[in-house]
Image (cartoon, helix red, strand yellow):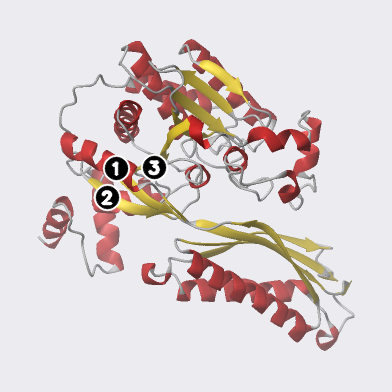
Amino acid sequence: MGLVRLTMTIVLPGHRPKNLNSQERRKLLQWLRMKRLPTANGPSALPAINQRRLMRDLNAIGRIGIGNRGGVTRLVFSIKELRSRQVLIHLMRQAGLKIYIDAIGNIFGRLEGRDAKAPAVLSGSHLDTVIHGGKYDGPVGVIGALEAVRTIGENKIAIRSPLEVVCFVGEESSRFGFSTLGSSLVAGEVHAKDLANAVDAQGTKLADVLSSLGIPAKSLRGLARDPKSLKAYLELHIEQGPILEAIGKRIGLVTSIAAPSRFKVVFTGQADHSGTTPMEMRKDALVAAALLIEFIETTCRRFSSMAKGRVVGTVGAMKIEPGVINAVPGRTELLVDIRAVTAPAKNRVARLVKAQALHIARQRTVGVEVLTIREEDPVPLDKRLLRLTREICDARQIIYEIMPSGAGHDAMQMAKITPAGMIFIPSQRGISHNPLEWTDPDDIGLGTQLLMETMIRVANEKF
């Protein structure tokens, strides 16, 4: 009987279960996965997107880079990532879009409107992945935008402004520690000198990879797009978190995007024999790193509430030298990612972490160096686009949630040059960047339909 009362609370708009203990929450989430909550979905005067075709194309992209255990790896500028872009170009050509590829490899597919000189409505995401990731993070936004524009073109729906589908390169930071590369260049937010510390796990510099692909650094200067050429940017994305599933809603409308402070911390001690060096005489760089990792965990927990900025902190990679069992580590390199939904909270925690790194180095008599990789501020999304998508959802009787994004997206860069909005759809169990990443095809279809209707409204209305 208690579970029934909880589910009734969730179904009612504006209500959420409160004061659930961990066991009750686990039972509730299990029930939600077994039986999806009913969500009203009123009729639309516009044609429906082709969900079967949408999932076919998503699965075609998802097979590129798939491993034995179902994980997908398409690191930026790898052969598999380049192959996925070739598939997208083929699909764009089939859809009759005019294709343009810029110097870094961002792909744009354009459907002209009645006024070819009007600013374009742009929508898309990325195709690169993390290592052993899922098949929906990124491609849902690219293929969803393609399906939306295809449906508009096939049904000869009148649009005033041109529509463009975009695939940005290098949204993920998995290879070089540098995120939203392609969209940052389009937004004019990054220059060749900013990529100096971008190096992959093999020690290969991003600048060298670009050079090997025939992309000189000077060619990146002209990638910034004229804001006057854009009317808006819209991005469909899986939530990559558990909130929508937990509250039984199929659509999330995003208010703002958290942003990271990313930096490299290098502790330099003394490599010594592990058997002959007394404990009190060691300068162990790994122990210094471990102390900092614990500090990051403890500090971010203190600032993790929404009232304190929803700060999260991660040490996502570590390199130890000499890296053998019988030697005291003489050098340890950490990659640190601090994020929050407010700039003051993020900056405060980042300063605390950097100060603690210096304190630990002095305390343990080791050297330390802190190298900035990326410094960004959280980005509010456009309130007019949010209001427009709410109007469409209300008219269609789609139950939605107004929410921030804890993950970074290309929309955070595009918001700096044009009005930007995001639509979220649920991630099962909140899992992402993982082979178990999964979103119900019906939710992908609903999100794409909402994206299409929003694009049409933006293209035809004064905005």
State the mark number for residue 421.
Answer: 3
Front residue of 282/176: it is 176
Q: Residue at x 77, y 50 (%)?
A: 196
Near mark 2 (Cα within 10 A), the count class, few <14, some 14-19 or many ≥20, is: many
**Which of the two discs, 3 and 1, labels the residue nearer the N terminus?**
1
Front residue of 31/247: it is 247
Q: Residue at x 57, y 26 (%)?
A: 107
Q: Residue at x 36, y 45 (%)?
A: 428
Horizontal side of residue 154 vs 89, given as left or right: left
The disc labelled 2 sits on which kind of residue? Glu
Q: In the figure, 381 relative to 16: above or below?
A: above
> Where residue 269 sits: x, y (%)?
83, 74
- Helix, strand or loop at label 2? It is strand
The disc labelled 1 sits on which kind of residue? Ile
Residues at discs 1 and 2 in contact (Cβ within 8 Å) = yes
- Helix, strand or loop at label 3? It is strand
**Which of the two discs, 3 and 2, labels the residue nearer the N terminus?**
2
State the mark number for residue 405.
Answer: none
> Where residue 138 sits: x, y (%)?
49, 37
> Where residue 296 sits: x, y (%)?
58, 72
Horizontal side of residue 390 vs 297, given as left or right: left
Q: Which residue is mark 2?
A: 401
Near mark 3 (Cα within 10 A), the count class, few <14, some 14-19 or many ≥20, is: many
Say which quadrant the C terminus sits in: top left
> Where residue 125 sits: x, y (%)?
49, 35
The disc labelled 3 sits on which kind of residue? Gly
Q: Which residue is mark 1?
A: 251
Can I make out residue 217 in this image? yes
Query: Mark 3 or mark 1, which is nearer to you?
Result: 3
- Helix, strand or loop at label 1? It is strand
Q: Residue at x 51, y 71 (%)?
A: 300
